[in-house]
Amino acid sequence: MTDSRLAIVVLAAGQGTRMKSQTPKVLHGLAGIPLIGHVLSTARALDPAHLITVVRHDRDRVAAAVLECDGACTIVDQDEIPGTGRAAEVALDALPHDFDGDVLVVSGDVPLLDAATLSELLTEHRARGAAATLLSAVLDDGTGYGRVVRDAEGGLDRIVEQKDASEAEQAITEINSGTYVFHAPSLRAKLALVSTDNAQQEKYLTDVVGLLRGDGMPVAALPVREGWLVAGVNDRVQLADAALRLNQLIVRGWQLAGVTVVDPASTWIDRTVTLDEDVELRPGTQLHGATTIARGAIVGPDTTLTDCEVGQGARVSRTDATLAVIGERASIGPFAYLRPGTIVGEDGKVGTFVETKNSTLGRGAKVPHLSYVGDTTVGDGTNIGAGTITANYDGVNKHRTEVGAHARTGSHNVFVAPVRIGDGAYTGAGTVVRKDVPAGALAVNVAPQRNVERWVAANRPGTAAAEAAAAANEGSEGTA
Ligand code: UD1
Ligand code: CA
């Protein structure tokens, strides 16, 4: 049920300088979705009456990504005054002016925080009737974070930023996670008083804590169970750390749901992937995007699937596939490359060193070895010979190849599209198929073989080949 007294503000206006990137920090990917996508879905899980994301840096890109993740989110633009405090202030201006509930502020760059922890924070804040409650964490080393300064009684006194902290304050290991709940009217009143008089010349949201405390308002800092929950992503080292931690959680979740993961450390699964019970993932498997894998399928080793659908009992080994549909019990690889639009039928096969693109293979159809199959339809039960190439591109346009059902095409064929090979047709080895082959016909167009006797002796005298041929011919002549 919607929490009518809750507004959530996601801060995402900052530049993210430490990423050193053309891509805004909150749009960097983590388990297949942008950092901010994780934050938005966690925020949405609390069902707030208002969900606001504050943007500024690369505004249009960030706003578009936010709306793609959560179409109901309100986008608010921060002005030229920098700092998290200013970001919160412009968000407050977008709320109804009589809103006197709680404002939960989260950072777009803290992706691992879960809804349960946020709920606990909110519950605790409400139970205490606090003006501000923040989530803190005790880390081995708090470098980079704002530090939680406590008074002699252990109560929260204020937050000091890394760049403004004295040496003694820098030694504090309890850090501000950047996640807070504020009583809306108190936040509004105190933000109006926050200045930019600090090392970064920014309006710090963290200053509100000290101001409330100075007025004798109840404020508290609650340490999280585990520090990684509130780990911020400011550079690419922290991005990889967060990705590793999240992947461990995702893999473990699937293991507990009945998926065999032979080597969790080398298995990467996006948050958007769906797996059935009794799927087996072998080492070196990466599953991305909207990939789904059905019961009993074995994927890996060394396989990357992006937006693929794998049917029950299929086997996919040492394969790279994107936007492919793999039928039940089909066999893919080792060393297959399935490009977008590949559909492999039930019991079908795409074998070793085969590349496919925009092609449909029927039920039980097989392309077992060393082939390129593009813009092609292959009927049920057909076998495509080893080393076959569909010449689908005439240099200007792409054309289709159609092979009917139960055809048997020879090794080392070229199908020059557009061309059609009928049901039950055969082609000889080495055939270049340039015109349609009727159903049931055999197509051959290789010139008859001509053997020029003793050519090596006459043209390559004194070579190892000539000697070997001479010895063979003597032997055969001796016995003749
Ligand atoms: C902030 C906190 C720090 C805390 C840390 C936790 C302040 C002043 N400091 O520092 O105490 O330990 O988070 O991760 O709040 N943002 C805006 N507008 C701005 C500036 C930033 O929306 O003008 C957004 C950023 O996009 C980001 C978030 O606020 O999502 C935090 O900004 P960042 O610059 O990363 O703050 P930190 O230095 O990490
Ligand atoms: Ca940060």
Image (tube, grey):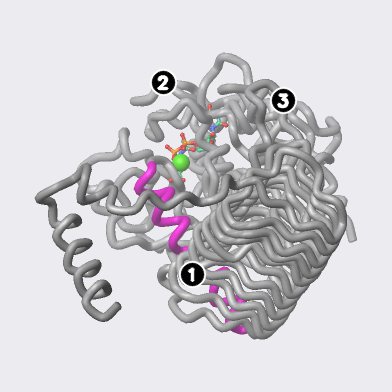
The residue that disc 1 covers is: 248
Question: Which portion, as a residue range, is magenta?
Answer: 236-257
Question: Crowding at label 3, few (<14), some or many (≥20) Cα neighbours within 10 Å?
Answer: few
Q: Is residue 437 left or right of residue 145?
A: right
Mark 1: which secondary structure? helix
The residue that appears at 74% across and 50% down in the rendered structure is 359
The residue that appears at 59% across and 47% down in the rendered structure is 446
Principal secondary structure, stretch drawn in magenta: helix
Which mark identifies residue 259?
Answer: none
Whole-Å distance between the Cαs marked 1 and 2?
A: 39 Å
Residue 119 appears anywhere in the view: no
Residue type, numbered disc 2:
Gln
Whole-Å distance between the Cαs marked 2 and 3?
A: 59 Å
The residue that disc 2 covers is: 201
Mark 3: which secondary structure? loop
Q: Earlier in the sequence, mark 3 or mark 1?
A: 1
Question: Crowding at label 2, few (<14), some or many (≥20) Cα neighbours within 10 Å?
Answer: few
Question: Crowding at label 1, few (<14), some or many (≥20) Cα neighbours within 10 Å?
Answer: some
Q: Residue furthest left?
A: 462
Q: Nearer the viewer, residue 111 or 435?
A: 435
Q: Find residue 154 and report its horizontal and vertical position in percent.
A: 40, 62
Which quadrant, please, contains the C terminus? bottom left
Q: Residue furthest right?
A: 1
Residue type, numbered disc 3:
Asn
Q: Find residue 49 and report its horizontal and vertical position in percent.
A: 85, 47
Q: Earlier in the sequence, mark 2 or mark 3?
A: 2
Q: Is residue 230 left or right of residue 297?
A: left
> On the image, which quarter does residue 381 sit in?
bottom right
Nearest-to-viewer mark from 2 and 3: 3
| Residue 46 part of the magenta segment | no
Q: Nearer the viewer, residue 122 or 25?
A: 25
The residue that disc 3 covers is: 397
